[in-house]
Image (cartoon, helix red, strand yellow):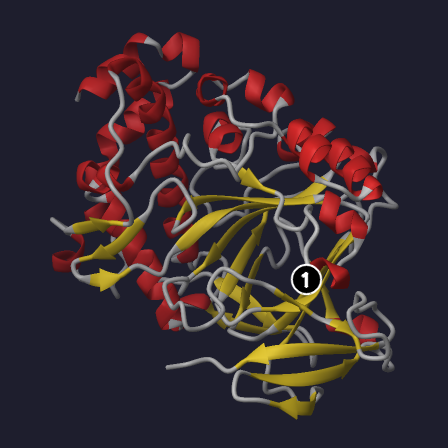
């Protein structure tokens, strides 16, 4: 209870009264579990951390406690949203789009076992916060995650304490491509406006706001990674604007703040965080052998501003052109008639949840033509991967597709694209 007292004493300075209340209520969550979970697996769970427990001084601990409290609030709302059926006919489940290529296909997301396990992992953390906290740290020793800097950092005592390398420093010192650097610095300049304000809203299934508007310390101090900005072989197949205009932060998972290897002896596959993608960008066709989900948290400036494409690996629209012991190379004609009907427009209010099975080829296009100030806007998402513990299936990587006509160049809409799908192991 020591950290609760510290937070109470500093509630005016840090605006954390709501967080204190949340911490005091956390252990009551077991009574609200969805029916597919067994309380015996949730209560008194045992945790094995991924790495060692970090020790902090009394002065440092107060900042870690603020970050931990906002982490609990983020995870709690996410588990409730995924199991909320008030907007559909599912049971203990939200509804998700999973394929757009032949009409919009949807499912009750909790029909997937990987989703049930991820939700169980979250509830095990929520109901055993003191035990789980041993696996939590601010990751101040990690030199490859960054602070957006600017107003977001300035308004967060935790981010100011951490003093992570800022995005401005990153793009100036580590990015060689001049156009990517220019775009990245513009992205950095406007990051605060992208993740805050009235345009960022939660889907209705969330019990409360978990955006940067309500959890400023978590969004400022989570540690952001501009995963496509630096030069790499993979980025030969990428667009410059997405390289300079995309980032993700990980809250719970092997690269995040809360790093748990096993709970009750079972490996943890949950990987939960957030993503930001600038408008006027095309996140290219890509795939990975790890399941992935997104919740859209943006109010669109116009209809069809945020468009998503998804095609399952067994679709008859994919043509197999090569098979090896590790992968299957497929082609898809993105210039075919009615291709524009294969894209779903979504927002925080309309079809906000997307689920991508292993090896689903997917892409995101954000049209900024209807934005008054496009440089200040982005699509913001709650993001997760559910079986990230399975290191046999391209753990931690994303495979970008390419032009079939011009290999090792970006796959553009309107041409034949080519993708390598991993042979998943079971």
Q: Residue at x 75, y 32 (%)?
A: 185
Q: How many labels sit on residues?
A: 1
Within 10 Å of disc 1 (Cα), the crowding (few <14, some 14-19, many 20+) is some
Name the element at disc 1: helix
Q: Is residue 17 left or right of residue 412?
A: left
Q: Residue at x 58, y 89 (%)?
A: 324
Q: Is residue 53 left or right of residue 161?
A: left
Quarter of the picture containing the N terminus is top left
Q: Position of residue 253 (x, y in %)?
A: 39, 50
The residue closer to the viewer here, 424 or 124, is: 424
Q: Badge 1 is on which residue?
A: 234
Q: Position of residue 270 (x, y in %)?
A: 37, 57
Q: Residue at x 56, y 30 (%)?
A: 147
Q: Position of residue 93 (x, y in %)?
A: 40, 63
Q: Is residue 214 visible?
A: no
Residue 41 sits above or below residue 209 on the image = below
């Amino acid at each position: 209870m020591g950290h609760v007292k510290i937070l109470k004493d500093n509630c005016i300075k840090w605006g954390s009264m709501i967080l204190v209340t949340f911490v005091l209520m956390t252990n009551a969550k077991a009574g609200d579990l969805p029916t597919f979970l067994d309380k015996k697996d949730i209560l008194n769970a045992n945790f094995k951390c991924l790495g060692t427990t970090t020790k902090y001084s009394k002065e440092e601990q107060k900042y870690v406690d603020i970050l931990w409290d906002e982490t609990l609030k983020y995870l709690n709302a996410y588990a409730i949203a995924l199991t909320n059926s008030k907007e559909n006919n599912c049971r203990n489940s939200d509804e998700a789009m999973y394929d757009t290529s032949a009409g919009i296909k949807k499912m009750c997301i909790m029909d997937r076992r990987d989703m049930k396990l991820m939700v169980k992992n979250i509830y095990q953390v929520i109901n055993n916060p003191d035990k789980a906290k041993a696996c939590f740290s601010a990751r101040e020793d990690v030199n490859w995650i960054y602070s957006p800097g600017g107003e977001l950092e300035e308004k967060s005592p935790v981010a100011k304490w951490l003093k992570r390398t800022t995005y401005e420093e990153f793009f100036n010192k580590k990015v060689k491509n001049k156009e990517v650097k220019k775009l990245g610095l513009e992205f950095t300049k406007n990051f605060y406006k992208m993740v805050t304000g009235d345009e960022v809203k939660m889907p209705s299934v969330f019990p409360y706001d978990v955006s940067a508007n309500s959890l400023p310390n978590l969004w400022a101090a989570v540690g952001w990674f501009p995963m496509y900005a630096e030069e790499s072989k993979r980025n030969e197949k990428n667009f410059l604007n997405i390289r300079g205009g995309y980032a993700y932060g990980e809250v719970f998972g092997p690269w995040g703040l809360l790093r748990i290897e096993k709970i009750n002896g079972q490996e943890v596959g949950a990987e939960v965080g957030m993503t930001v993608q600038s408008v006027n960008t095309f996140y290219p066709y890509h795939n990975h052998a790890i399941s992935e989900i997104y919740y859209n948290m943006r109010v669109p400036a116009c209809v069809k501003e945020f468009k998503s494409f998804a095609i399952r690996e067994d679709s008859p629209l994919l043509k197999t052109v090569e098979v090896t012991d590790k992968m299957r190379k497929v082609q898809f004609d993105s210039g075919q008639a009615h291709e524009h009907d294969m894209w779903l427009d979504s927002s925080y209010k309309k079809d906000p949840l997307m689920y991508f099975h292993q090896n689903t080829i997917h892409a995101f296009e954000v049209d900024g033509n209807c934005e008054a100030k496009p440089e200040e806007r982005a699509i913001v998402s709650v993001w997760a991967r559910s079986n990230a513990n399975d290191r046999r299936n391209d753990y931690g990587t994303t495979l970008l597709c390419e032009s079939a006509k011009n290999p090792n160049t970006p796959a553009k809409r309107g041409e034949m694209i080519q993708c390598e799908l991993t042979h998943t192991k079971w």
